[in-house]
Image (cartoon, rainbow, N blue to C red):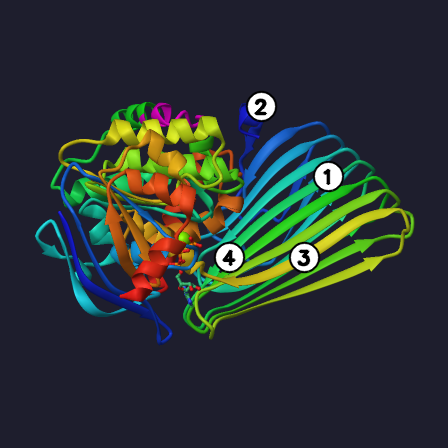
């Protein structure tokens, strides 16, 4: 991604705009802003267009309702990160033209008594589209996270490839993260998979890092940063990436 | 440099180290051998401060300090390095980033200025060359997907970066092919000096052909039952431990 980044034009989002239309063949990156917008937004991606989308929420409770429509041959690469106080996120993706491709990486961190609800609905309406999602959650305190991931494949959507992964890290045994995968597959020639894991911190890794001179807090933080890296390291926009690292740092600080 | 007296340690109520006496002076190389399960890794872990084990008796003095009262990280910063028998993978954390943090901590402890990014890169280059570590490995996540041999080389690379006063290398030679063994041994030898010391835990005489020890010790059931010079390793290779164990049990 980074090698092609300069070809992407930054799309300036008018404040409060609810409908975003990307012209056929356009290449844009859209930063949906650090403040999560209220209400539903629709992004329509024209034929063959390529879009890099970022939605980052650094404070407050996230409220995001987003609909993405992908026309034939278009590609959307979306990164969604929620580091505020949990929230409610509904993303619906309609793969409406053949050969459309959707890639999604999301990360949220919740602590205290925060709640995060992330619902992703990926709809393969026509044949020959691809989608792949990874959603990562970290929960501390008595926080709760929930990811509902729907993959819908319409009867005519043959040769669909759809993958979904949910990877979660609990910092104690009172925090909780649930994954609810939902598959509705009506076509028969489909490659589809989903998986979920929930794990605790790797104490052997903490021991290893401390043996190299990192104190325990630094070692724990580094491990969490490493866990988040699947999502953050894909962000091509360097400014956004370093901004995100600061936000993650601050969020992790607040967990203890 | 290191004085271990009557060290006892247990895990879950089971005693594993049963009165170890062991002394290391600057400039020395010690080899610790012994049958599987005799407590070699436990001894190394206890020295490095592992919280899995409980020290129930004895004392350990390291460079004039009471080692047993120091935290894991302070022991490391004070120059105690453990080369792990099973190096741990840390997904998503690059070797470079990991080493940057480790070096920064060590320099802070020593009251030195942090390295500039350029100095750090130069150091990485220099030290990875010593162990002929593929430079691509240093940009990957710590040990993730490294082959067995690469993991061991990576331990020696980290040792080269951190320049410890006392390095305890737990079976760093196991699983290495002949070339890798030579590279690892060369790395260790290049880091030897009059000020630092090395403890090699090994099953094989082979390593000791490359890194010649001043002393060879045999650990058995949590005790050092015999110590000798480098020729002891050869004898053990030929005759095994039986004769020593019999001799020990006769006492
Ligand atoms: N966490 C633990 N819980 C229970 N027993 C343990 C634990 N760690 C080590 N032991 C036991 O302590 C004994 C010594 O183990 P250790 O790993 O120190 O042996 P070793 O000499 O390094 O063996 P090897 O040559 O196979 O590496 C073994 O019997 C082992 O099963
Ligand atoms: Mg061992």
The x, y position of residue A139, in whole percent, is: 47, 65
Asked whether mark 3 lies closer than 8 Å to ligand 1, one says no
Magenta: main secondary structure equals loop
Task: Name the chain letter of the residue that bears numbered label 3.
Answer: A
At numbered mark 3, what does the secondary structure look like: helix, strand or loop? strand
Task: Name the chain letter of the residue that bears numbered label 4.
Answer: A
Label 3: few (<14), some (14–19) or many (≥20) C-alpha neighbours in 10 Å:
few
Q: What residue is disc 2 on? A: A7
Do marks 3 and 4 both belong to one polypeptide chain? yes
Identify the magenta region: B127-136
- Is the residue B177 above or below the residue A217 in the image? above
Q: What residue is disc 1 on? A: A101
Q: What residue is disc 3 on? A: A195
At numbered mark 1, what does the secondary structure look like: helix, strand or loop? strand
The x, y position of residue B129, in whole percent, is: 36, 23
Q: What residue is disc 4 on? A: A108
Asked whether mark 1 lies closer than 8 Å to ligand 1, one says no
Towards the viewer: A251 or A27: A251
Q: Quadrant of ligand 1?
A: bottom left
> The N terminus of chain A appears in which quarter of the rendering?
top right
Do marks 3 and 2 both belong to one polypeptide chain? yes
Label 2: few (<14), some (14–19) or many (≥20) C-alpha neighbours in 10 Å:
few
| Marks 4/1: CA–CA distance | 24 Å
Task: Name the chain letter of the residue that bears numbered label 1.
Answer: A
Q: Are marks 4 and 1 in contact (CB under 8 Å)?
A: no
Q: Are marks 2 and 1 in contact (CB under 8 Å)?
A: no
Q: Residue visible at 27% across and 57% down?
A: B224
Left or right: where does residue B152 sit relative to residue A214?
right
């Amino acid at each position: 991604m980074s090698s092609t980044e300069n070809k992407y034009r930054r799309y300036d989002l008018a404040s409060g705009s609810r409908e975003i239309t990307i012209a056929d063949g356009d290449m844009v990156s859209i930063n949906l802003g650090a403040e999560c917008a209220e209400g539903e937004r629709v992004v329509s991606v024209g034929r063959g267009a390529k879009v890099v989308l970022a939605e980052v929420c650094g404070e407050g409770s996230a409220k995001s309702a987003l609909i993405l429509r992908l026309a034939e041959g278009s590609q959307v690469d979306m990164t969604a990160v929620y580091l505020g106080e949990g929230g409610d996120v509904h993303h619906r993706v309609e793969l409406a033209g053949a050969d459309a491709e959707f890639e999604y990486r999301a990360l949220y961190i919740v602590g205290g008594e925060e709640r995060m609800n992330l619902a992703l609905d990926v709809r393969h309406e026509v044949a020959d589209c691809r989608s792949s999602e990874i959603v990562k959650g970290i929960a501390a305190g008595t926080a709760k996270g929930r990811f509902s991931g729907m993959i819908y494949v319409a009867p005519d959507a043959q040769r669909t490839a759809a993958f979904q992964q949910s990877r979660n890290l609990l910092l104690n045994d009172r925090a909780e993260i649930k994954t609810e995968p939902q598959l509705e597959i009506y076509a028969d020639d489909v490659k589809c998979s989903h998986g979920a894991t929930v794990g605790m911190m790797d104490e052997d890794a903490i021991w290893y890092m401390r043996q190299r001179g990192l104190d325990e807090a630094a070692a724990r933080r580094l491990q969490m940063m490493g866990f988040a890296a699947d999502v953050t390291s894909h962000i091509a926009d360097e400014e956004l990436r370093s901004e995100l690292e600061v936000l993650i740092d601050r969020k992790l600080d607040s967990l203890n | 440099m290191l004085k271990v007296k009557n060290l006892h340690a247990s895990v879950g109520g089971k005693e594993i180290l049963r009165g170890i006496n062991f002394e290391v002076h600057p400039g020395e190389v010690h080899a610790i051998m012994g049958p599987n399960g005799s407590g070699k890794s436990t001894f190394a872990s206890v020295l490095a401060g592992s919280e899995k084990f409980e020290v129930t008796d004895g004392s350990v003095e390291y460079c004039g300090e009471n080692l047993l009262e120091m935290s894991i990280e302070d022991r490391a910063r004070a120059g105690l390095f453990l080369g792990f028998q099973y190096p741990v993978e840390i997904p998503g954390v690059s070797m470079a980033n990991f080493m940057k943090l480790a070096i920064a901590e060590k320099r802070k402890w020593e009251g030195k200025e942090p390295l500039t990014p350029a100095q750090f890169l130069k150091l990485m280059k220099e030290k990875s060359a010593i162990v002929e570590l593929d430079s691509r490995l240093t940009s990957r996540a710590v040990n993730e997907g490294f082959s067995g041999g690469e993991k061991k080389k990576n331990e020696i690379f980290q040792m080269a970066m951190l320049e410890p006063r006392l390095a305890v290398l737990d079976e760093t030679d196991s699983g290495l092919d002949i070339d890798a063994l030579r590279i690892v041994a060369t790395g260790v030898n290049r880091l030897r000096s009059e000020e630092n010391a090395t403890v090699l835990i090994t099953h094989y005489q082979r390593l000791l052909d490359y890194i010649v020890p001043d002393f060879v010790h045999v650990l058995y059931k949590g005790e050092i039952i015999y110590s000798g010079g480098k020729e002891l390793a050869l004898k053990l290779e030929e005759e095994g431990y039986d004769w020593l164990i019999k001799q020990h049990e006769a006492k």
